[in-house]
Image (cartoon, grey):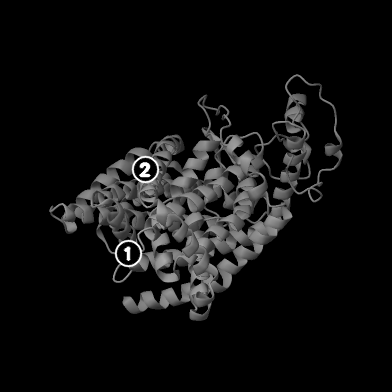
Amino acid sequence: MNALNDAITAVNDVFWSWLVIPLLIVLAVYFTLRSGFVQLRLLPEMFRVIRSSPGVAPDGKPEISSFQAFAISAASRVGTGNIVGVATAIVLGGPGAVFWMWLMATVVGSAAFVESTLAQLYKVRTGTGFRGGPAYYMQHGLGQRWMGVLFAVVITITFPLVFNSVQANSISGSVAATVAELGGPGGWLLNAVVGLLLVGLVALVVFGGVRRIAHWTEALVPTMALLYLLLGLVVVLLNLEELPRVISDIFVSAFGAREFVAGGVGAAIVQGMRRGMFSNEAGLGSAPNAGATASVSHPVKQGLVQCLGVYFDTLLICSVTAFIILVPEPEYGGVGGVQVTQVALASSLGGWAVHALTVILFLLAFSSVLGNYYYGETNLRFLDAEPHHLTYFRALVLVAVFAGSVAPLTLVWTLADVFMGVMAVVNLVALIPLSEIAFRLLADYGRQYRNGLDPQFTLAKMPDLRNVECWGDPEGALPEDIARGHGVRLGDPVVPTDDQDRPDDGGEDGGAGR
């Protein structure tokens, strides 16, 4: 088994290092330049649009808000990787890995913007709101259903089944460690009890549909972020005099001559970029499944919000982990993963902080289970799954959660990396031709934004687009739809604008900006 795991790991390292990461970096740099650095230039706008109110679904209840869609994607993004992954990056690549993690997040934010804007454009309506994602824009935007089917199958295996097993394993492991420190019983029986409790909690949520998932994640994500930020803030305040040294270590280790000669810079770059990408998932095609559920007035709005999600994950949560680890100048010998963070916390705050971290890990992992499950549901619906098939799928997810709580998962985790790499490549290939549509939408958003309007969109503005279901009929649009599509203020007369005559005007200004 170890030989098989080592062989798959070797193939996986080559696959990610020579195909997935280079492809993502090249495309993200292109998207950044083509959009006029949208992920930096419109940062204030991201905070404005995340507060927008949703519409009303066909069943009369509120649709998913922009913030709720953000919370679903953040629930999946922000998991144990933010603690374990960052610790591993620092152990293997030194403090400099943190800098490259920051840089990677800043660059790939543009890819997150493009994929989630496209997911919004090509979403479809359901009885309770919307659903969509890469599989949908592959079929409706590219006209390649086979590509959408491949993506849907891979993500359904990877996130709700395999990754949820790993998250459950992290929960049972952290609980077992805390119970052991308190002198309680451990072993398989404890893991089984934890697994059964977790299965019950997950079942209560996932059988309630996307609205219940949204409500839970809307509550869990801010709670876990606040708790973790408070822990990090206490560590920094107690060691305030060490803060300049920590920042210096990050930058010196990223660029220092000593590290360059010793090969440490290369390790820092590889570990920082890879762990950062695993953490924020930008460009991998997972977050757009959540972004498509939002009820917004323009596709670009949720593209901006999902871009903000990358920053929330990496620049905020991962940075807290980095500072917790680096402030006490840790020695890494003999420990790895979550133990690095636990040792660092205990050295700064005492043993109680380890138990607090267990609670936070539970919230992180549990919210990830919910977000990962939804990615599977929305892609099963793309595959035209019948209602009873979804019931079987939910039961299978619960089995995976229990199995993950009681079984070692080294090989499963390695296989998951391979599946996720395939998923990422399929998504990135689809983004290459479709990205120009996202930039046209950004240009339209920019023209309205500069005129002091709250940007709105209907298909009447870009009637050449095909297979777009949720943004109005270009041939049968009502005057009020056209008005909303051109950002006309309520009560203003509907007057044709030059924009109607230039549907593919997207390359001149590339985006919004006052």
Task: Tell me, yes or no, if residue 382 can be seen here.
Answer: no
Mark 2 is on which residue type?
Leu
Horizontal side of residue 270 vs 364, given as left or right: right
Q: Quadrant of the N terminus?
A: bottom left
Q: Residue at left 45%, top 34%?
A: 211
> For the residue carrying disc 2, how many other residues have a C-alpha within 10 Å: few (<14), some (14-19), or many (20+)?
some
> For the residue carrying disc 1, how many other residues have a C-alpha within 10 Å: few (<14), some (14-19), or many (20+)?
some
Query: Residue at label 1?
Result: 409
Q: Residue at left 39%, top 36%?
A: 208
Q: Position of residue 428 (x, y in %)?
A: 61, 60
Look at the numbered disc 2 and give the secondary structure of its residue. helix
Q: Position of residue 288 (x, y in %)?
A: 56, 48
Query: Residue at label 2?
Result: 227
Look at the numbered disc 1 and give the secondary structure of its residue. loop
Q: Residue at left 56%, top 27%?
A: 56
Mark nearer the N terminus (1 vs 2): 2
Q: CA distance from mark 1 to mark 2?
A: 28 Å
